[in-house]
Image (tube, rainbow, N blue to C red):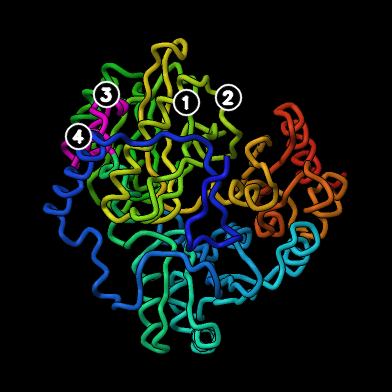
Amino acid sequence: MTDPAPENARRSMPVVQLCAAPVDAGERDRLSALAQKLFENDPALTSTIHFGPNVDCGLHAGGPSLLLADQSEISLYGAPEDMHLEYRLAALAQAGDMLVLSHDRSPAFEGYMHDYLGISGLDVMTAASRPGERRWPLPKRCLQHQELFQHIAHRMQTCGLLTIVPYLSTGHVWNLARRLTEATGIHVAIAGPPPHLARCVNDKVWFANRVTQVLGKQALSPSVTVYGPAALTGHALRMASGSQRLVIKIPDSAGSAGNLTLDTAIFHRRSTASVQQELQEMLAAIGWQGRFPLKIESWEEQILSSPSVQMWIPDKKDGQPIIEGVFEQIVEGTAGKFAGAIKSPMPASAKDKLTKQAMALAFLFQQLGYFGRCSMDALVTGAEYAGADLHWIECNGRWGGVSVPMTLVNRLLPEPEDWHVMIVQRLNLELPARSFQTAIDRVEDLLFQAKLCNEGIILLTPTGYERGEGVHFFALAKTQAKVRALSRDAMNRLTEQPAD
């Protein structure tokens, strides 16, 4: 079921509604009142006054977009050069769009996008870090590299407008937009929320507080937020008495990067002081800088599903949030590292409860001024779906590992909801460094080709493969069995090591 496209939709970023879960009038009034209270407590929540009158949230239907797939402003993620996924947003591009990378281009991947996916005319630019300087986020580098900045400004002047499509809407993104409008006098739309609101939505503690206000405390895993070392230790010891495992989360990180999973047996017969010291040392080992608050959660048992609800939140004048997909996340390791996703096989009744709750949260965010891509992750726990508990884990107020391939499928196929998808995102592998052309050669007979076949493998990024550190693709087929078989075959071929 295709949702009527808003007037400002881009054809390379179609929005396709999976299901309707409208918020009724009474609930709309309650959530709007809650939004007003949040504004009273934080008047600057959606303020963009510093960035000037020519910059705001939105998405121009025409003109060029500037794609910035920079993950470095997420806590613990490292510098842009450490990432493998900067080419990912190329899947959202149309002819004339610009993509900025921190690393060398991959001509083989750009050729693949043209030949197999019909994505061409992309203006790819590099903003390498300067020797001896801090490795700044990409939006700031666009300001520092005068030739790059002037090129973007010239494209704006030629076309009369610009949309910035960031992986994550940050102050650096908005400041780049401000500087571009000052240089050109031309309007810039940012396909994301105001930066302060984006930071809040992505923060696990802030999100948990909104879940409690909207859905009640029962909609969260047993957890506590702590604001200092003594509270961290005391609550960890208390919660350890009723749980074999705990998870300590750094709220402003994402996914598993900021998760420390603990076997509570390490606390047995230990002094409070020694436990406190060990907790701080273990957190420091994953990159924690000593900042509070932290969130402690009991480890969930009897997990039936780990669904992720994919949404597009338009400006509130354009209608309610749109649910585009419900996916089952594939995670690995005790920290729950994202490794891929498939369309969720949850029963309809459980999916209905999930989407209604997600819609209520998204409606609140919309009333606060949120715009753009958003997903919410949850856990369904219990012996069976009937009577199972639904606990919300985190919100991803940004593009991600599911939303980009989902949008690409919406773009490539006329009835995308009829197809099964399996996303594979495996990083930190130990493989030989190889050219991307090698990847194409290994899976050539499996590759999806736009307008010629509707099943196959779509390669999403080249960098991990070229560095010998990962693979990143998704499979598309009519059945779940076929999509799993395609994924296994492609994974085996792409990770096969040469014989000694």
> Marks 3 and 1, Cα distance to the nearest angstrom?
18 Å
Q: Nearer the viewer, mark 4 or mark 2?
A: 2
Of labels 4 and 2, earlier in sequence is 4
Amino acid type of the residue that numbered disc 2 sits on in the rendered structure: Pro
* Disc 4 to disc 1: CB gap under 8 Å: no
Give the amino acid at mark 3.
Gln
Residue at 42% across, 32% down: 355
Left or right side of 221 for 426: right
Image coords of residue 7 (percent x, y): 48, 61
For the residues labelled 4 and 3, the Cα–Cα distance comes to 32 Å
- Measured from the top left, where is residue 445 in percent x and y? 88, 46
Q: Residue at x 16, y 49 (%)?
A: 36
Identify whether 424 is placed above or below 261. Answer: below
Circle on res. 218: 3
Query: Which amino acid, by three-letter code, is at mark 1?
Result: Lys
For marks 4 and 1, the one nearer the N-term is: 4
Q: Is residue 447 among what the camera can see?
A: yes
Label 2 Cα neighbours within 10 Å, binned few <14 / some 14-19 / many ≥20:
few
Indicate which disc residue 345 carries: 2
Residue bearing the label numbered 4 = 273
Residue 177 falls left or right of residue 37: right
Residue type at numbered disc 4: Ala
Q: Determine the residue positioned at 38% across, 82% down.
A: 179
Given this view, does label 1 or label 2 mark the residue nearer the observer? Answer: 1
**Label 4 vs label 2: CA separation?**
46 Å
Of the two numbered discs 3 and 2 on the same chain, state the one appearing first in sequence.
3
Q: Which residue is labeled 1 in the image? A: 351
